Image (tube, rainbow, N blue to C red):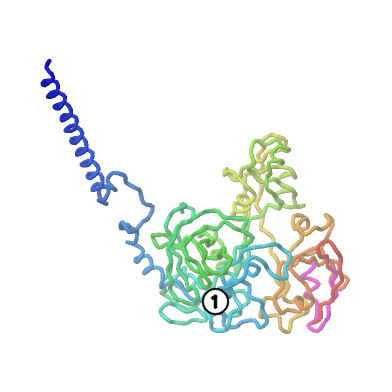
Amino acid sequence: MTPTIMRELRSRARGGRVLTALVALLVVSAMLFAAQEYTASPSAAVAAAPVPSTAAIPLSPSGAAGFPEVAKAVTPAVVNITPSTVMQGREPRDPSDSPLGSMEEFFGFRGRPHGPRPRGPFGPGEPHGSSVGSGVIVSPDGYILTNNHVVDGASEVTVTLPDKREFKGKTVGRDPKTDLAVVKIEAHDLPFVPWGDSSALQVGEYVLAVGNPFGLNSTVTLGIVSALGRGHMGITQYEDFIQTDAAINPGNSGGALVNTRGELVGINTAIFSQTGGYQGVGFAVPAGMARPVYDSLIKSGKVVRGYLGVAIQELTPSLVKSFGLKEPKGALVSDVTEDSPAARSGLQQGDVIISYQGSPITDPAALQRAVTRTPVGTKAVLTVMRNGHEKELTVMVGEQPDSVKVASAGDTAGEHALAGLEVQNLDPKTARELGLREKTRGVVIVNVEPDSTGERAGLTQGDVIREINRKPISSVQDFEKVSSGLKKDQDVLLLINRRGASLFLTVRA
């Protein structure tokens, strides 16, 4: 082959490779352009990767459609609640009375022995006429659900509807253990928010918080459910909170948390904040907990809860090993109250309750929630682990003993020296928490009304009253009997136990 022919062939080969490269480049460019056009089209993207929505109201690509309809339906039924009277000298119950509350104000009950606990964003103690909290109309005949800390200490409240109508409200009942209360106004054919199923909520689902933050009526904020079943917060005794990032601020307490169908799934109760204002973490009492409390308060003015009569504790890894368990799930029985439903059923100290009415028990909080929601008189089946073996027990659920309020705030004037104290029986678990001896007898103070004679004498939450005027006190019944015989102007000599130390104290009338 001649050199001329060789050069011609090499030239043609180089040209072919260039042409091939150019064709490949054009093909890749076309594919990229097509992909860009495809992903830029919302309909194409949705068709390629459909994402199911849990919202009941159809959403636009921006996620906004449907929310105006929910807000329009719900806001007429969310009211402003203001105490008609404010106790003078009363310490604010909640840090966000000022939106610039300090860490100490937010987390600590000053003057009380118990440790840090987050609290609701606002409460009584603000100047007369200022917005204190919110409430939700849940029936057309004027029943309103709100937080206990919104109405606590008020003998009467003013309820203002979004349409500017004002009513005098009467507190039907309060439940400090869940921080819920029911207020009644005399009106009919009112707008109301229907109950929803909080157990159907999912993390990531849209919710709206409706209330009156900073006195700005009918404010609606949007967020998602960021967690469910929040407990161990120290906010209330019974906790099963919905956590949300919907903005909740001072004035939202008692307001509605609703789903995208406009149904009530929670009552906004508390915020977790370093400033007292919104920082993305709010808590609401779920409707599943609120509705039985509401029904019970309407029916009897108090909350009737199921009761076993046991002290229970968490299972740590070391306890799991000691009790021969496979995993740290269940509630360990640390004590059984004498003559209680648990004692009569044969439940023993050291048993680990792993199932209640067929539902698994993961921790003590789960058992507590299940038992307190069980109707009194129900025969409940427990599955326990005892000495490495499963055992079934049947217990007749009793009624949880009530604490006794001698006098409510606002009614202490003219009463005897112990008016304004709230006490309950001293059970073994509380005695241990207070560092008391096992055989200590008495009643434990769970609340002291601000500016009462008891507070001025130095009584505080956690003090155990052992004697009144040298008469021994071993139960709430003893306390009621002796205190009911006190005269209005009679000084009272108490023997109390404070953190393990005995102390005589005079309460002057």
Instruction: Return the x and y of residue 246 as percentages of the image width and height.
Output: 46, 63
**Residue 301, image quadrant:** bottom right
Q: What SS does tag 1 mark?
A: loop
Q: Which residue is mark 1?
A: 132
**Residue 67, image quadrant:** bottom left
Instruction: Return the x and y of residue 400 as percentages of the image width and height.
Output: 67, 58
* Res 45 seen here: yes
Instruction: Return the x and y of residue 171 as percentages of the image width and height.
Output: 57, 75
**In the displayed structure, would residue 179 be above or below residue 25?**
below
> Magenta segment range?
476-495
Q: Residues within 10 Å of mark 1 (few under 14, many from 20)?
A: many
Q: Residue at x 54, y 64 (%)?
A: 295
The residue positioned farthest toward the front in the image shown: 3
Residue type at tag 1: Val
Q: Residue at x 60, y 83 (%)?
A: 85
Asked if residue 54 lies left or right of residue 356, the reply is: left
**In the displayed structure, would residue 127 be above or below residue 365?**
below
Q: How many marks?
A: 1
Asked if residue 384 lies left or right of residue 487, the reply is: left
* Res 200 seen here: no
User: In this view of the protein, which residue sits in the foreground, 250 or 350?
Assistant: 250
**In the displayed structure, would residue 143 be above or below residue 411?**
above
**In the displayed structure, would residue 461 be above or below residue 13?**
below
User: In this view of the protein, which residue sits in the foreground, 66 or 250?
Assistant: 250
Instruction: Confirm whether the magenta stretch covers residue 413.
Output: no
Asked if residue 382 lies left or right of residue 61, the reply is: right
Instruction: Return the x and y of residue 51 as percentages of the image width and height.
Output: 34, 48
User: In this view of the protein, which residue sits in the foreground, 205 or 265?
Assistant: 205
**Residue 34, image quadrant:** top left
